[in-house]
Image: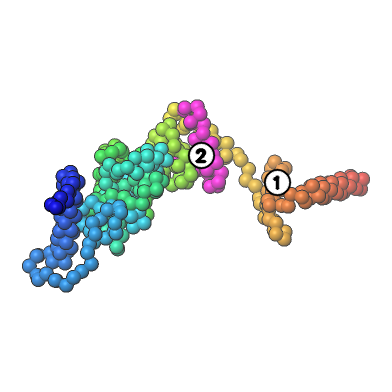
Amino acid sequence: MALTPPKFKVDPTAAMKRLQQSANAAATDRFALASKVMQTQPTGLTAVDTQPKEEVEPISSGSRFDIAQCVPGAIVSVPLHMIDLNDLGPRQIYQSVEIDKIAATITESQDDAAHGYVKDGRVKLIDGGTRVRAAKVSGVDHLDVKFEAEPENPLALYLRARSYNDQRSQPTPIDHAISLRKLIESGAVPNNRVIAEKIPDPSGRPMSESQVSMYMRVSRMPERVLQRMSENPSTTAFTILYAVSEIFEKILDKSQAEDTALSIIDDIRQKDLSKQQVITLVRSKLEGTKHRERSTQQTLSIGNYEGVVKVFAKRGQIELSMKNLPPEQLPELQKALVAKLEDFFKEQQAKTARSSSSE
């Protein structure tokens, strides 16, 4: 009896796919090996070490990260925990709207690679701060980074980051002001004159030293005030920023200056004030503070409770403030305070009466 030969079903499409995957993997391995060889044998003339070494896996979001692959020209998927942000970048304040916009798509793909370099075994970003924040918000644990040579100095780092940022959008006056202050504080530039010589304004035009000084004054405003002003187009214009910054030049009490500035910012938004109206409002606030009496203060520390007594002598006013008191004891405390005050004033009235009768 003749045997029927077994039949085999062949899927040409699947076979070609497996062949292509195998070829791609082999090519990746060859390029990875070549890159590693060039790092250890840049001339290609020394003998190749034939001892078996650990295989270099292709670098992707799903494989082991290798800092050795982060060479200039390469685009590498870098774990977020290996990335350090650029504190000297032209973007200093990040809006949640912009972060959320990128976060909505970064889980699928990253349209543009960030730029960075390797230093001290870590990846230092040149630009890409918004993309890092978007990745964290969306739960993505990596960022595609295109590598280049380390900038020569901090000023070169800033200018390089600025060139990338300008391709997308100009830095805001607030970002620009903070960047200039950080460049001075970090020692990247020695003074305002060098800034004027080497750094353009947000629109790309050269700056004078007086303009730099104006930006510096804006940058000295508290972070909370700058953040609030950055949230609305009506308070991001440089002329408005500079007008509001006068508050912090004239009012020495930091808390009072901040409250005054925030009040002005609210008025600008609600009333859509012009530049001249803002200047007038600031002046009126400053003139009001000139006649404001400063209090003398005495701190209280009684057991576990602390407070402060403020005395405004010219106004004949006294204020007592204590916090974190037991709520159940407040009624009794109130009665005791009122009784003590009544006793005091009765005694004062009696003294006045005795003094009058003796005359």
Residue at 31%, 50% (x, y): give it. Answer: 143
Residue at 18%, 70% (x, y): give it. Answer: 52
Is 250 included in the stretch rendered in magenta?
Answer: yes
| Residue 149 visible in the snapshot | no
Magenta part of the chain: 245-273
Extreme residue toward the front, this view: 1
Find residue 206 and report its image quarter.
top left
Element carrying mark 1: strand
Q: Which residue is label 1 attached to?
A: 319
Element carrying mark 2: helix
Q: Where does the image place residue 58, in percent across and percent down from the top left?
A: 23, 56
**27 lies above or below 130:** below
Q: How many marks?
A: 2
Q: Where does the image place residue 213, in percent across and percent down from the top left?
A: 37, 44
Q: Where does the image place residue 44, in percent across and percent down from the top left?
A: 9, 65
Horizontally, residue 98 falls left or right of residue 311, namely: left
Report, in whole angstroms, how far the alpha carbon at label 1 lies from the one at label 2: 25 Å
Q: Which residue is label 2 attached to?
A: 261
Q: Where does the image place residue 106, in percent across and percent down from the top left?
A: 33, 43
